[in-house]
């Protein structure tokens, strides 16, 4: 089964390097300290080009979610129904990351019954095993399984 993989560009490469080590970090302006995602060269708040990568707790809440149903891309159809969530990070609430709620880092995308998902539910990050490109995607575990 072939699933979509992220396209890694120069601005986002550090995000994936940290993820490969099991760390969730967010690009942060070195001048005004505002976190930003997706990564980009210039701060949208103060226009500085200086940034660093700040570790975050990996905790958040489900801000929104969808449960895709067929017809889907091949490779995903056999996993339906599965969830795709938008997670608002607890320690960087302007940052929202897309992912899937699963029962374990290596669990399939359909491992959580969609009926268990709720807006506002607490989640914490885990990282999937490396894909064909060696990337480890952030995934989410429910805080209260």
Image: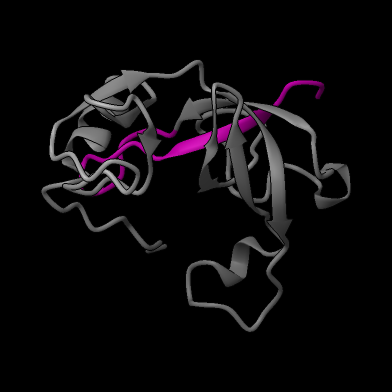
Q: Judge whether residue 94 can be spotted in this image.
A: yes
- Foreground residue among 74 and 145: 145
Give the position of the N terminus as an image quadrant: bottom left
Residue placed farthest to the front in the image?
A: 46
**Residue 19 in magenta stretch:** no
Is 72 situated left or right of 51 in this image?
right
Which residue sits at x=23%, y=49%?
Answer: 40
Q: Is residue 145 above or below residue 2?
A: above
State the residue at coordinates (60%, 49%).
109
**Where is the C terminus found, in terms of image quarters?**
top right
> Which corner quadrant of the image does residue 123 belong to?
top right
Q: Which residue corresponds to the image point at 37% horizontal and 63% vertical from the top-left?
A: 4
What is the quadrant of residue 3 in the picture? bottom left
- Chief secondary structure of the magenta portion: loop
Image coords of residue 114 (percent x, y):
81, 51
Q: Is residue 22 visible?
A: no
Q: Which residue sits furthest right? A: 115
Q: Position of residue 52 (x, y in %)?
A: 20, 25
Q: As displayed, is residue 2 above or below residue 98?
A: below
Q: Where is residue 62 in the image (x, y as percent from the top left)?
A: 71, 40
Task: Give the magenta-colored segment's residue range.
Answer: 128-145
- Give the x, y percent position of residue 28: 30, 29
What residue lies at 52% left-to-right and 22% top-to-bottom? 58
The image shows residue 71, relative to residue 82, as above or below, that is below
Give residue 25's quadrant in the image.
top left
């Amino acid at each position: 089964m072939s699933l979509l993989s992220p396209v890694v560009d120069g601005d986002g490469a550090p995000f994936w390097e940290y993820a490969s080590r099991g760390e969730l970090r967010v690009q942060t302006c070195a001048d005004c300290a505002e976190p930003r995602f997706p990564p980009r060269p210039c701060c949208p708040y103060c226009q500085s080009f200086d940034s660093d990568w700040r570790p975050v707790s990996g905790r958040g809440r489900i801000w929104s979610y969808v449960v895709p149903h067929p017809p889907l891309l091949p490779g995903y159809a056999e996993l339906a129904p599965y969830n795709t969530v938008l997670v608002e990070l607890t320690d960087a609430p302007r940052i929202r990351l897309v992912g899937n709620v699963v029962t374990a880092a290596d669990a399939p995308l359909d491992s959580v019954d969609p009926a268990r998902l709720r807006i506002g539910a607490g989640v914490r990050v885990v990282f999937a095993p490396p894909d064909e490109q060696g990337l480890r995607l952030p995934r989410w575990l429910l805080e209260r399984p």
